[in-house]
Image: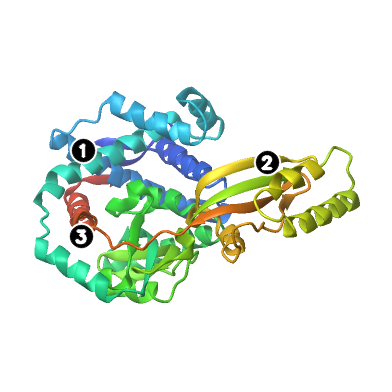
Amino acid sequence: MPSVIKATAIVNGEVITQTDVDQRLALLVIANSGKVPNDQVEELRQQVLRNLIDESLQIQAAKQAEITVTDKDIARTLERVASSVKMNPDQLTTYLKANGSSIRTLRRQIEGETAWRRLQQQKIENTVSVGDDEVKAVLERLNASKGTEEYRVGEIFLSSTPDKMQQTIANANQIIAQLRQGASFPGYARQYSEASTAAVGGDLGWVRPEQLPDQLGGVLRTMGPGQISSPISVPGGVSILAVQDARKILSADPRNAVLSLKQVSIAFPPGTSRPQAEARVAKFAEAARNVGGCGGAERIAAEFNGEVVANEGVRLRELPQALQEIMLPLQVGQATRPFGSIEEGVRTLVICGRDEADPTAPTFDQVFNQLSEERVNLRARRYLRDLRRDAVIEFR
């Protein structure tokens, strides 16, 4: 039987075909720029099947709760997804088909995420309560922790039972290997994480180690920006942490500065030899070192037949990590060393202004929302576990 009609699993009477698995796996590969080694494809395929089973359970539970995800709901989200990759929905449809996936599988994923989010709002969020005293206690601890580190953290949670823990850890190690080779953490979180934060790429926001369960907090204290943890055993499964950034609580942080920049770019005409280009870059670097303030950007551009682009309100923290390290020690009026390539052009950034952001404590509402999200996340995991326990699932 062709895979398009051959059942791989039947979830409470709803069929998941091999084509469903293949197209969702292709979607994952596309999201990670094709960086999935051949020897890991079969393992990822099994994980995709488990995700599709959970997705079916979530959609079925939402329908039983009379929650409807309309075609208009899906179309709006699809429009945003297409826009994020600079396409319209028709172009995205063609692109997915050309790469072994389909718009149908993306629509199904959007439906699943939307249905699960709305189901959590109805069944869980409305029943979660956080007291004012709890929020005040957190704010007091924050003030007492002034100057200590907090981290911007992403999490991927894989559920497991004790008898399947070794296999779950093996699956987590496969994911970690891909992440450390440059795969997208938000992309993998959306596909694999069973936490409620999966829909936002696993983002936990800014947290301190003591705000997390002891197993996660202990590992977080040993990590720095850009690092991916090994599998961490937690109640109900395994977690993977990624530290995206770090800062000191309620303390001035130079990475929070808002910059005014001028970018000076130069290009190399076709036929320019590498020695000629390197000599020109050396002169450009010397000119950048002696820029003499923001006004020197136009002078350098004129000298090297380049162009100047002004950028206002650039947050240093949002720049690539390597560029942050270059710009942190620079003062207003100084320029970075040139970067880029001979093929795509070389540029330097001149700092024209720097506004240091004052450290502020989180608001009552921000702390309240974080505590609520943590409790919703825990209950959502339990709810999905119960759906799996009560489901009738046949494998073919």
Q: Nearer the viewer, residue 255 or 26?
A: 255
In this rendering, the answer to whether 126 lies above or below 82 is below
**What residue sits 14% from the left and 42% below the top?**
122
Pointer 3 with pointer 1, Cβ within 8 A: no
Q: Which disc number belongs to residue 60?
A: 1
Marks 3 and 1, how far apart in space?
28 Å
Image position, residue 157 (x, y; %) = 33, 59
Disc on the earlier residue, 2 or 3: 2
- Report which quarter residue 105 is drawn in: top left
Q: As rendered, which of 18 and 136 lies closer to the eye?
A: 136
Mark found first going from the N terminus, 3 or 1:
1
Q: State the SS at label 2.
A: strand
67, 130: nearer the viewer: 130
Residue denoted by label 3: 371
Residue 244 image position (x, y, % from top left): 45, 61
* x then y, percent, for residue 12: 21, 40
Picture quadrant of residue 338: bottom right
Q: Nearer the viewer, mark 2 or mark 1?
A: 2
Q: Which residue is mark 2?
A: 308
Task: Describe residue 103's horizontal placement relative to residue 290 as left or right.
Answer: left
Q: Amino acid at mark 2?
A: Val
**Is residue 144 left or right of 134 when viewed as pictured?**
right
Residue name at image x 39 percent, y 52 percent: 189
Q: 10 Å neighbourhood of mark 3: few (<14), some, or many (≥20)?
A: many
Q: CA–CA distance between discs 2 and 3?
A: 46 Å
Q: Position of residue 383 (x, y in %)?
A: 18, 52
